[in-house]
Image (spheres, grey):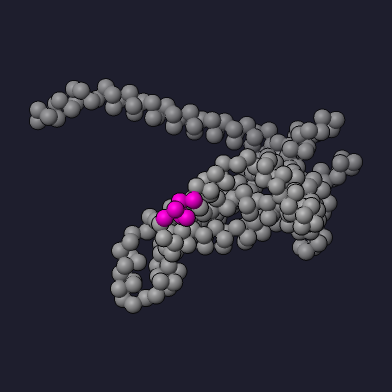
Amino acid sequence: MPSSSLYVKHRRPKDTALKFLINAAAAVCVVTLLGIIGYILFNGIPYITWKFISTPYSETNDEWKGILPMIINTMYIVVITLLISAPVGISSAIYLTQYAKQGRLVKAIRFTTEILSGIPSIIFGLFGYTVFCILFRLQTSILAGCLTMAICILPTVIRTTEESLLAVPGSYKEGAMALGAGKLRVVLGIVLPCAMPGVLTAVVLAMGRIVGESAALLFTSGLSYNMPKGFWEQIFASGRTLTLHLYQTAREANSPDAMNIAYATAAVLLVLVFLLNRLAGLLSRTFRKG
């Protein structure tokens, strides 16, 4: 009882102040987020129509100001980039946590990954333009943009997946190996399924980086707004994403509806990111139940 009274006497003012600071910081974050989202939706939703979403875009014809090509290009880049980077990133994380000896090599790889995650995206764009567009002769194309974005998000996938794999209790693996299961079967059948929610979190973070990227894609995927004619033709052709369309449209000061189109595009972009995150969340809950 005396110790409890002493704790109340000497600790409660500090705890109250710290609690107030934590709540204030959380409130600032929430209010800022809601303010940004509300401002974009308030200015963008009035200009979103079915015609705006389902028609192509033209800089000369005011009747054609849709964003359908940009939505298709964005989905192309998201899907293809994840197909390239997710297997490489997850496999790298499995190697670092389950197979590699924890020595200088692993430390060097992790240090390199952290450095790579801190490089500005504009440098990735310059590298992608030099290597993929010029050296590999892909020109400014969807495929060049996907390869560049795969390098951009690889550190995120590796580090997040690695932490998820390390969080799996070691007793699971030890018990399975004690029953005679092989190393590969333990990793793919026990460790990886247990870490799958964290792996999906890595995929969600990667999707957010892809959808919101503009600097790297500005150099590599180009600014063409032509309607895609076919999958193979489009991935080798130039195409702007929603973020690039938002950037390019906002710069068109001569058009009276430029900012309205930009706000509407931003609102569609927010909705698209929300839907992709919800889809990943549903998959994560499915794996948890399984």
Q: Which residue is drawn at 28% across and 24% down?
A: 14
Q: Which of 189 and 288 is in front in this view?
A: 189
The location of residue 273, given as percent across then percent down, is: 60, 47
Quick one: which residue is furthest to the left in this view?
Answer: 1
Quadrant position of the C terminus in the picture: bottom left
- Residue stretch rendered in magenta on the structure: 103-108
Does residue 142 appear anywhere in the picture? no
Q: Is residue 161 magenta?
A: no
Residue 266, placed above or below residue 198? above
The location of residue 162, given as percent across then percent down, is: 46, 55
The location of residue 128, given as percent across then percent down, is: 71, 49
Splitting the image into 4 quarters, where does residue 197 fall? bottom left
Q: Residue at x 34, y 72 (%)?
A: 177
Quick one: which residue is furthest to the right in this view?
Answer: 60
Splitting the image into 4 quarters, where does residue 227 fall? bottom right
Residue 70, placed above or below residue 46? below
Asked whether, in this view, residue 169 is left or right of residue 109, the answer is left
Does residue 176 appear anywhere in the picture? yes
Q: Residue at x 81, y 33 (%)?
A: 252
Asked whether, in this view, residue 186 is left or right of residue 93, the answer is left
Asked whether, in this view, residue 240 is left or right of residue 20, the answer is right
Judged by its main secondary structure, the magenta piece is: helix
